[in-house]
Image (cartoon, grey):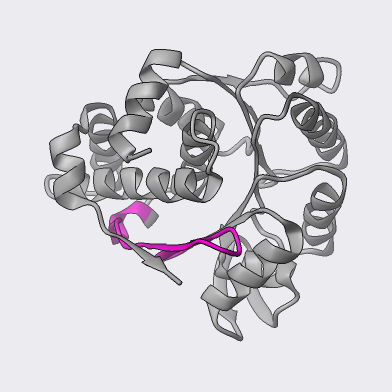
Amino acid sequence: MSISETLRKIKEQKPLVHHITNWVTIYDCANIVRAIGALPVMAHAIEEVEQMTSISSALVLNIGTLTVDLVESMILAGKKANEKNIPVILDAVGAGATDLRTNKAVEILEKVKISVLKGNSSEIGIIAGAEAETKGVEAISVKGNLVEISKKLASERNLTVVITGKEDIISNGKDTYICKNGHDMMGSFVGSGCMAASAIGTFAAVEKDYALASTNALSFIGIAGELAAKTAKGPASYKTIFFDEIFNLDKNKIEEMIKIEKRE
């Protein structure tokens, strides 16, 4: 489906997108899902995550503020999502920064069938076994070709890999896309990466080609980011305008501004 067709389906179906996510950005993740037209829910308690997942259309996991107990909730919810055959998006925030983050990201990948693995170049590089350096949650360097790293990891893990950056790379091992939408101002406030995972989860709730869903979601929010930069005066106004652009984007503007390249 095209971006516009996916948006129409989201607004018609209003899928419930369950998050076990980052406490720093949880409010923004909920808001972007709602602005796109779906319904967000943020349920972390181990006693209810399976039941909440069972009534959802997608599950977004984000290890930005992980604890051991929180990962247990993620694995329980992920297994329930696998039973229900709904997409699971894992945002490997900070993988490589500490052993705990790296080990828990890998543990989730081993115990849950992940549909989309998202991260910056360092996070994905670390999980793929490449030589990479990270600083907190920021990518510093990765040795190797990122497109090839994404394709190889996608094939090995049988999932879609998303590497976010100035140009986003999306691959399921067979189909590979480069998304060139976006603006530098999207990195001027905390949370844009987490919101990208939520947008991917929202699109994947209605589009079962997860590489295409991820690509379209990133292009969609990237277009909104470009439009917001035209009138924003700084990070605070930019973030507000960004949400408004997400809410108001129409088919004509999307088709005029979309920048997606498919690679062999």
Residue 204, x across and y down, in percent: 53, 36
- Residue at 32% across / 31% down in the picture? 5
Extreme-bottom residue of the structure: 143
| Along the line of sight, the residue nearer the viewer: 121 or 210 | 210
Q: Where, quadrant-wise, is the N terminus in this rendering?
A: top left
* Picture layout, residue 147 above or below residue 107: below
Q: Looking at the image, how many numbered discs can be counted on the residues?
A: 0
Q: Position of residue 200 (x, y in %)?
A: 50, 41
Which quarter of the figure has residue 70? top right
How far across and down, in percent of the image, does residue 218 sit?
A: 40, 49
Please say whether residue 181 is one of the residues in the magenta stretch.
yes
Q: As drawn, is 102 to the left or to the right of 92?
A: right
- Report the span colored magenta: 163-186
Q: Image height check: is 199 above or below 37? A: below
Q: Is residue 135 visible?
A: no
Q: Find residue 71 and report its image quarter.
A: top right
Q: Nearer the viewer, residue 88 or 131?
A: 88
The answer to whether residue 235 is above or below residue 22 is below
Assess whether residue 109 is covered by the magenta stretch. no
Q: Is 236 placed above or below 73 here?
A: below
Q: Is residue 215 visible to us here? A: yes
* Residue depicted at 33% across the width and 40% down the height: 2
Q: Residue at x 51, y 61 (%)?
A: 175
Which residue appears at 77% of the width and 54% of the height?
Answer: 105
